[in-house]
Amino acid sequence: MRMEPAIRGGVHMAQRHDSAHKHVTGEAEYTDDIVEPVGTLHAYLGLSERAHAEIVAMDLEAVRAAPGVVDVFTAADIPHNDVSPVGKNDDPVLAAGKVEFLGQPVFAVIAETRDEARRATKLAKVEYRDLPHVTDVAEAIEAGYPFVTDPLKLERGDVAAAMAAAPRRLKGRMRVGGQDHFYLEGHIAFALPGEDDEVTVYSSTQHPSEVQHMVGHVLGVPSNAVTVIVRRMGGGFGGKESQPSLFAAIVALAAKKWGRAVKIRPDRDDDMTATGKRHDFLNEYEVGFDDEGRVLAVDASFAARCGFSADLSGAVTDRALFHADNAYYYPAVRLVSKPMKTNTVSNTAFRGFGGPQGLIIGERIMEEIAYALGKDPLEVRRANFYGGPGRDVTPYHQTVTDSIIDKVVDELVASSDYAARRRAVLDWNAKGGVIRKGIALSTVKFGISFTATWYNQAGALVHVYNDGSIHLNHGGTEMGQGLNTKVAQVVADVFQVDLDRVKITATTTAKVPNTSATAASSGSDLNGMAAQNAAEQIKDRLVDFAAEQHSVEKDQVVFEPNMIRIGNRRVSFDELIREAYLGRVHLSAAGFYKTPDIHWDRAAGKGRPFYYYAYGAAVSEVSVDTLTGEYVVDRVDVLHDVGRSLNPAVDKGQVEGAFIQGMGWLTTEELWWDDKGRLRTHAPSTYKIPLASDRPAIFNVKLADWSVNREATIRRSKAVGEPPFMLPISVLEALSMAVASVADYRECPRLDAPATPERVLAAITRLGGW
Ligand code: MTE
Ligand code: HPA
Ligand code: MOS
């Protein structure tokens, strides 16, 4: 055991986000804040007015003649017109010959000012020949629309036989809505031309290496000509995993052609219309179960509105299947995905990456069984948790060896006083008033690792300068989640120096190559390990040097808080570094990490795609006005597992933020396309994210501080970014309970998501309330 840590900001300590003060004061530099060189040009996109049409003619003369316009690009001006992140060649930068959704970029205007570029786009005359279009997933299935990518099937056991033999069966379907990312900072890219084939692009991206490769591909230059830099994003939430490439490609192309800096920043409406969102799903399930409420068989399909191209929809719909079991064991199971093509914007990653849309079916199945048997849904959940041998294999044949869901739920049930409060809710509703209450406990088990196994690698670069200050760079990107703070804590801890000695620097493809997206919640798992590896290399060299220099054994060189003990001497970190520099010790190292022991055979539907699972549970209580469908969330209690937290303050913030964002997804955030295929909810006036006033009146969030990752992750922590996003399913099911009370809980109200007040009122009416 180490002594009380005396360094400031070490690992496992609550430490504020390194940029928190700057976020609040406005001093944090985002891409749009970078000082523009003289002569910077501005680009703006002209968008399709049709959902599906051939482009018959395009008259851009008035655009070219507009004040300030320098250039207009169409598909013909793009050397390699594709930014598909999965190599499907189905994501044109600018539409060529036809458009496949309303809002698709068709041309780009380059002008002296942003306002001039934006105004000029309105002067285009595009002649379309309409083709039949489909925007909705059910319509797409009916119309025989194709899949955008290969579907997945997961199967274990004899489903047909188990279903037939089950004493009870039920079938249901659930529509699960999509979601706009609503990052505070929208998409933006800023390119500076260099000499020969070189270009530097500042991009608000979670995936600088992909932007680098895509810009290189579009321009027809090798990756070594392109440098992508991002200091921070004003939120990404998955919306900046694949979507930034298009913007980066446009400005890089214009910058090279004109030899001037070029920036692009769409308005919020255009950002919402032209860039991908969370997939909405249409899920259908049949479940066989016994009189105790134990599941015997599950047969389910998951159809997603993917939009016009594949983008990341394959991996997103795969992850939906990977989470359809949630924390529950299905003895026989068959799950299939249907990644449907539609004439809408190509949907993309969003916190949970399809997991939430699958996991919600696991939770809905528990509710369905409880209503069918007249039981407390918590009892049904408990009866179905993954257990020991015989009840521990997932639909994808990975064995669950680390389940702590029972302990998490037991502790939360006690701390939230669930049993007494449920009795009180039932009593309240029995009085038959207008205001009805509901309470529900839901759980989360979320698999950590990219299911594309090769993505589970990371690099870092650490320099120690000869004044003893430390420069940290790694392949991850900061989007508000506190990744940089956590990785810096790891490095400070290795050297046993105060955190403020470690300078966090912008992510750039020139320092760490071939990085993965900062996604799948794995940023700190991967980059924390890579940075630790780099720091330890330097530390090892310092130990060797000091031992030799002072003629002591290596174990006599000990890094103590802000001091190094060498035999019976003690020197400051600065002194040691100075000596080491003069002794010509290499004070820089590149670190690397790859997640061990994971593998996945997609064709067989078998493997160990996840290194480990993160667990959590929440109890939510709501009040519903049964005359209007309006509701409030009265109280939420959360217990969430982050293993041994690297930074409990940042992790708690992640849990709180994820809960509120997930609550928005399930309650007020609704995307709506009209029959022309136009997204009508493209601004805060029509798209309602949670307000501060929508916060639960009582919001008790706790980390399971006893949890330790059984795998050797960075300091035994667990990933935190996405798993808590699914905890507010408890809010949806609490709303269901309040609704069900108008019909004495005889049936599951099957609330679709989002459960807007309109949908809640419709369900009350359907059940015969009032
Ligand atoms: N938190 C903030 N503040 N902003 C974000 O954009 N993105 C989420 C989550 N938390 C996000 C966030 C998503 S989608 C992921 S995958 C993780 O953070 C990514 O960061 P990590 O892997 O470092 O946790
Ligand atoms: N999660 C998030 N992003 C991804 C994944 C994943 O599993 N796979 C590819 N990109
Ligand atoms: Mo997060 S959806 O994996 O960027």
Image: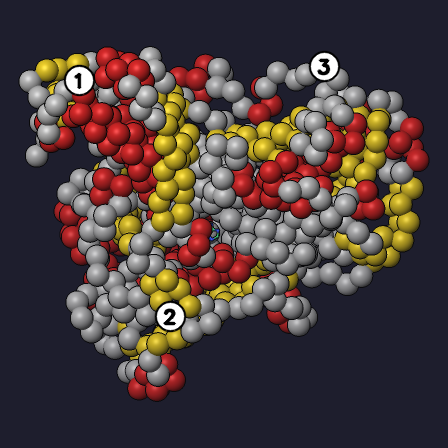
Q: Earlier in the sequence, mark 2 or mark 3?
A: 3
The residue where tag 3 is placed is 38
Q: Earlier in the sequence, mark 3 or mark 1?
A: 3
The dot on residue 72 is none
> In terms of secondary structure, where does tag 3 sit?
loop
Please tell me whether residue 121 is drawn above or below residue 222 in the rendered image: above
Report if residue 624 is visible in the image. no
Q: Earlier in the sequence, mark 1 or mark 2?
A: 1
| Closer-to-camera residue (41/730) | 41
- Spot occupied by residue 211 in the image (x, y as percentages of width and height): 59, 40
Q: Amino acid at mark 1?
A: Met
- The CA distance from mark 3 to mark 1 is 48 Å
Residue in the image at 17% along x and 14% along y: 571
> In terms of secondary structure, where does tag 1 sit?
strand
Q: Amino acid at mark 3?
A: Val
Q: Amino acid at mark 2?
A: Lys
- Spot occupied by residue 366 in the image (x, y as percentages of width and height): 31, 64
> In terms of secondary structure, where does tag 2 sit?
strand
- Spot occupied by residue 638 in the image (x, y as percentages of width and height): 26, 43
The residue where tag 1 is placed is 563
Would you say the beta carbon of the disc 1 residue lies within 8 angstroms of ligand 1?
Answer: no
| Closer-to-camera residue (362/108) | 108
Residue in the image at 72% along x and 20% along y: 40
Query: Based on the displayed image, in which of its 4 quarters is residue 700 positioned?
Result: top left
Quadrant of the snapshot with the N terminus: top left
Label 1: few (<14), some (14–19) or many (≥20) C-alpha neighbours in 10 Å: some
- The CA distance from mark 2 to mark 3 is 57 Å
The residue where tag 2 is placed is 606
